[in-house]
Image (cartoon, helix red, strand yellow):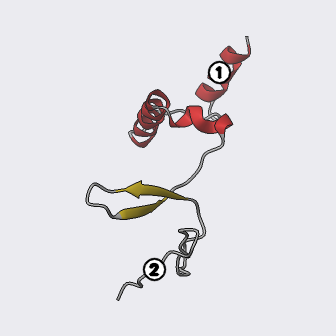
Amino acid sequence: MNPVLTPDARRRITLPARPGLDQPLEFHSEADGSYRLVPVVTIPASQAWAWTPGALAKTKAGLEEHHAGKGISANSSKGAAFLKKLDR
């Protein structure tokens, strides 16, 4: 059974303790008048670029190439030659 929460004089409620609920929550006000709390993960601003659609697409493409065996190891002769080109 879900607990019934009653706001205090300042219109605050206290959420019951729940395992895993020690992270930030996003508050959603639904069209039917209900509220929904959604756990979120925050990303430091300096790393936000990695979560743009373009960066995610490139990461996905790179992983697909790797899983298809198209990648080269930096420890191989091909990889060493590639890294040497980058140093120029």
The answer to whether residue 61 is left or right of residue 79 is: left
Give the residue at mark 2: 5
Residue drawn at (57%, 73%) of the image: 9
**Quarter of the picture holding the N terminus:** bottom left
Residue drawn at (27%, 54%) of the image: 31
Residue drawn at (61%, 28%) of the image: 79
Is 25 located above or below residue 12 in the figure?
above
Residue 42, x across and y down, in percent: 59, 50
Q: CA distance from mark 1 to mark 2?
A: 65 Å
**Quarter of the picture holding the C terminus:** top right
Residue 81, x across and y down, in percent: 65, 21
Task: Name the residue type under label 2.
Answer: Leu
Instruction: Indicate which disc residue 29 carries.
Output: none
The answer to whether residue 5 is left or right of residue 30 is: right
The residue closer to the viewer here, 37 or 33, is 33
Q: Earlier in the sequence, mark 1 or mark 2?
A: 2
Residue 86 location, quadrant? top right
